[in-house]
Amino acid sequence: MEVHGSCHCGDITYQAEVDPQLVGVCNCTDCQMLTGSAFRVTVPAPSTQFQLLTGQPKTYIKTAESGAKRRHAFCPTCGTPVYASAATDAPPSFSLRVGCLKEKAQLPPQRQIWCRSALEWAKNIGELPGRERQ
Ligand SMILES: [Zn+2]
Ligand SMILES: [Zn+2]
């Protein structure tokens, strides 16, 4: 599926080809911290299928508990996360942030990882009383 992404301020735009079957939720504590939220939703795009159209993301190299390094790209103006990749010159794929994709409604997660650190309260938010707007 072709997807179109952008950051909140609009400086960074990109397009990619992704497999909707690979959309996943990550409950790791790094994703909680880096998103400021309960979990992150991502979909990988092979680097050959990812095209940055406008803007230049700033990057931050994160070292995981395991020692693995990941390059996190974000907009230097608005801070929106754009992607993460291996911290190498030619990463094989980019992990796109589904919340930034125009097609996000058609990309429901198919699996979740790092359930050990999943927040209990985040598991059933569909049961919370809700309103259409704030
Ligand atoms: Zn921006
Ligand atoms: Zn994570």
Image: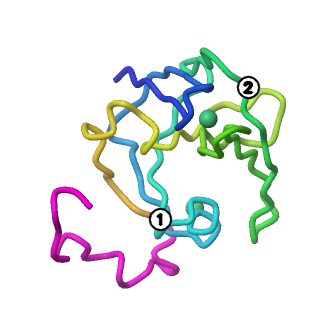
Q: Amino acid at mark 2?
A: Gln
Residue 74: name its quadrant. top right
Q: Amino acid at mark 1?
A: Phe
Q: Write the residue at 70% across / 40% down.
A: 73
Establish if 46 lies above or below 106: above
Counting other residues with Cα less than 10 Å from the Cα at mark 2, is it few (<14), some (14-19), or many (20 or more)? some
Q: Nearer the viewer, residue 98 or 19?
A: 98
Q: Residue 27 location in percent, x, y?
A: 49, 68
- Residue 99 sits inside the magenta stretch: no
Q: Earlier in the sequence, mark 2 or mark 1?
A: 1
Q: Residue 119 location in percent, x, y?
A: 44, 80
Residue at the extreme front:
134
Determine the CA span between mark 2 and mark 1: 25 Å
Q: How is the image coloured?
A: rainbow
Ligand 2 is within 8 Å of the C-beta of the residue at disc 1:
yes
Q: Nearer the viewer, residue 55 or 112?
A: 55
User: Relative to residue 83, is residue 77 drawn left or right?
Assistant: right
Identify residue for label 1: 39
Q: Write the residue at 16% across / 64% down.
A: 131
Q: Write the residue at 60% across / 45% down.
A: 81
Look at the image and tell me in which quarter the N terminus lies: top left
SS at circle 2: loop
Identify residue for label 2: 56
Query: Circles 2 and 1: CB distance less than 8 Å?
Result: no
| Residue stretch in magenta | 113-134
Classify the position of ligand 2 by quadrant: top left, top right, bottom left or bottom right: bottom right
Q: Residue 79 location in percent, x, y?
A: 65, 46
Residue 101: name its quadrant. top left
